[in-house]
C-alpha cells in the first residue's frame, strides 16, 4: 500500500503551497486594513453621504481601501449600484 | 537592566506556556534571575507545566489588588535557582488585572533585580493578551506551521506594533522573535506542511528557533517539568538553542530535516 500511496502522493497538489498562497493574499489584505489611515472611516461615511443624496444604497455597499501599487498610493472605491 | 519579554501568539494551544516555561528555565540555568508570570487569569496553567500547582498560595491578582506582597506570591522553583513563578488567579475574572497594577508589579520585579521578566500571554487579542504585551521590550511570537496560527500571529504582530507602551510612547518598537513550534520536517518534505522559510517569509520577523514536534513535550507536561530539562530530547535541545540565540549566541538551526528513509522503507514501509 505504501507504494501506491507514494505514487499517488506525487500527483496531488501540495497543500503547503496552497496554504502559503492563501496566506499571502489574506495577510496582505489584513495588513492594508490595519495600516489604513485614521481618517479613512470618516471619509468613507462622508463619501457615502454624498452618494446617498443621488442613489439609494446600503451602508455596506461601499468598499474603500488604500493600497500601494508600483510606488503609488491608490485609493480604491468599490460601489455596487442597486438594480433599477 | 531588566528585560521584559512577552510570549504571545494570538491563537491558543500553539505552545506559549510550554515555551515560557522552557525559556524561563533555560535563562535561570544560565544564572540569570528570572520571573515568569501567568497572565491567563481564570485559566491558569503555567503552575501546572512548571510543577508547582500545589504551592500556589497567593497569585498575580492578589498582588495587583494589594491582598498579598509580591514576595509572598512569588513561588521559588524547587529545581532551578533564581527561577520564580507568579501564578494567575483561577477564581477571578480577567478584569481583576489593571494596567497600573501590572505596571507596578513589573516595576517592583525590576527593582528586585530580576534580569528577565517573562510574561506568558493568554490566547486571544483581548484585555489579558494586551496587558501581557503592554510593558514588553521584546516579544517571542509562538507560531505553528498552520494557516490559522500564522494568521493570528500576524494579527498579534499588528497589536505589538500599535498598542504596546513602546509603540504609544514613540520609543523604539518591541523587538520581535519568531519561535516556530510543532514542526514536522517529514511533512514539510512531502509538501503537507508550511516550511520554516514559508512562515518566516509570510510573517517577516527574525527566526529565533524551530521546535520539532516531539512526544517529550507531552511527557514533560505530564510530569510538570519544563521540557528543556529533558536534555536528551530534540525539543529540549531546540529550546536550549533558542535560549542561547536569545542571549546573542550564533547557532545554526537544527531539526529542520527528516531522517532519511531507505528505498526499501519508502516503498514497503509504513
Image (cartoon, coloured by chain):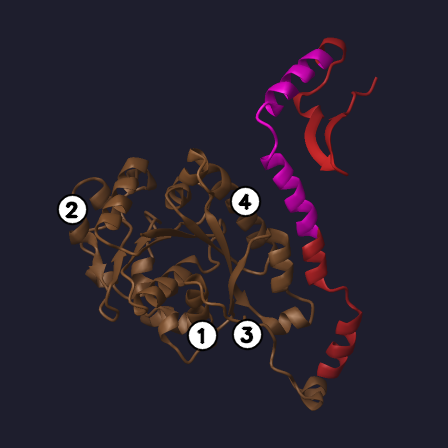
Which label sits on residue B155? Answer: 4
Q: Chain of mark 4?
A: B
Task: Name the residue at the top extreme.
Answer: A53
Residues rendered magenta in the picture = A22-51
Q: Could you tell me residue B92's position as x and y percent?
A: 27, 43
Structural distance between the alpha carbons of marks 2 and 4: 35 Å
Label 2: state its secondary structure: loop
| Image quadrant assignment for residue A17 | bottom right
What residue is rendered at 39% in x and 71% in y? B228
Q: Chain of mark 2?
A: B
Q: Earlier in the sequence, mark 1 or mark 4?
A: 4
Q: Could you tell me residue B208's position as x and y percent?
A: 50, 61
Structural distance between the alpha carbons of marks 3 and 2: 44 Å
**Pointer 1: what residue?**
B237
Mark 3 crowdedness (10 Å alpha carbons): few <14, some 14-19, many ≥20: some
Do tag 1 and tag 3 residues touch (Cβ < 8 Å)?
Answer: yes
Q: State the quadrant of the N terminus of chain A.
A: bottom right
What residue is rendered at 68% in x and 50% in y? A24
Q: State the quadrant of the C terminus of chain A.
A: top right
Badge 3 and badge 2 both on one subunit: yes
Q: Earlier in the sequence, mark 1 or mark 3?
A: 1
**Pointer 3: what residue?**
B255
Structural distance between the alpha carbons of marks 4 and 3: 27 Å
Magenta segment: does it hold B265?
no
Give the chain ID for the red colour. Answer: A
Q: Could you tell me residue B73's position as x and y percent?
A: 19, 52
Badge 2 and badge 1 both on one subunit: yes
Amino acid at each position: 500500500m505504501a507504494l501506491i500511496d507514494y505514487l499517488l502522493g506525487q500527483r496531488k497538489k501540495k497543500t503547503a503551497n496552497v496554504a502559503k498562497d492563501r496566506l499571502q493574499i489574506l495577510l496582505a489584505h489584513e495588513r492594508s486594513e490595519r495600516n489604513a489611515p485614521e481618517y479613512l472611516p470618516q471619509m468613507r461615511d462622508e463619501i457615502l453621504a454624498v452618494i446617498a443624496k443621488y442613489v439609494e444604497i446600503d451602508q455596506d455597499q461601499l468598499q474603500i481601501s488604500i493600497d500601494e501599487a508600483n510606488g503609488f498610493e491608490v485609493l480604491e472605491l468599490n460601489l455596487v449600484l442597486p438594480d433599477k | 537592566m531588566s528585560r521584559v519579554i512577552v510570549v504571545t501568539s494570538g491563537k491558543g494551544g500553539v505552545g506559549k506556556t510550554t515555551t515560557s516555561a522552557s525559556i524561563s528555565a533555560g535563562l535561570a540555568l544560565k544564572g540569570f534571575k528570572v520571573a515568569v508570570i501567568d497572565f491567563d487569569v481564570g485559566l491558569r496553567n503555567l503552575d501546572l507545566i512548571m510543577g508547582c500547582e500545589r504551592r500556589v498560595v497567593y497569585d498575580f491578582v492578589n498582588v495587583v489588588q494589594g491582598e498579598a506582597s509580591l514576595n509572598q506570591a512569588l513561588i521559588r522553583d524547587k529545581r532551578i535557582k533564581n527561577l520564580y513563578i507568579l501564578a494567575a488567579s483561577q477564581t477571578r475574572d480577567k478584569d481583576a488585572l489593571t494596567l497600573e497594577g501590572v505596571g507596578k508589579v513589573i516595576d517592583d520585579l525590576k527593582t528586585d533585580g530580576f534580569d528577565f521578566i517573562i510574561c506568558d500571554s493568554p490566547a486571544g487579542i483581548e484585555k489579558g493578551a494586551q496587558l501581557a504585551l503592554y510593558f514588553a521590550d521584546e516579544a517571542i511570537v509562538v507560531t505553528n506551521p498552520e494557516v490559522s496560527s500564522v494568521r493570528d500571529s500576524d494579527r498579534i504582530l499588528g497589536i505589538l506594533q500599535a498598542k504596546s507602551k513602546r509603540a504609544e510612547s514613540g520609543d523604539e518598537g518591541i523587538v520581535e522573535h519568531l519561535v516556530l513550534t510543532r514542526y514536522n520536517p517529514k511533512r514539510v518534505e512531502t509538501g503537507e506542511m508550511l516550511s520554516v522559510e514559508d512562515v518566516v517569509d509570510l510573517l517577516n520577523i527574525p527566526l529565533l528557533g524551530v521546535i520539532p514536534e516531539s512526544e517529550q513535550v507531552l511527557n514533560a507536561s505530564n510530569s510538570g517539568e519544563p521540557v528543556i530539562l529533558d536534555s536528551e530530547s530534540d525539543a529540549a535541545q531546540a529550546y536550549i538553542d533558542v535560549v542561547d540565540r536569545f542571549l546573542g549566541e550564533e547557532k545554526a538551526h537544527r531539526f529542520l530535516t527528516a531522517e532519511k528513509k531507505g528505498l526499501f522503507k519508502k516503498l514497503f514501509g509504513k
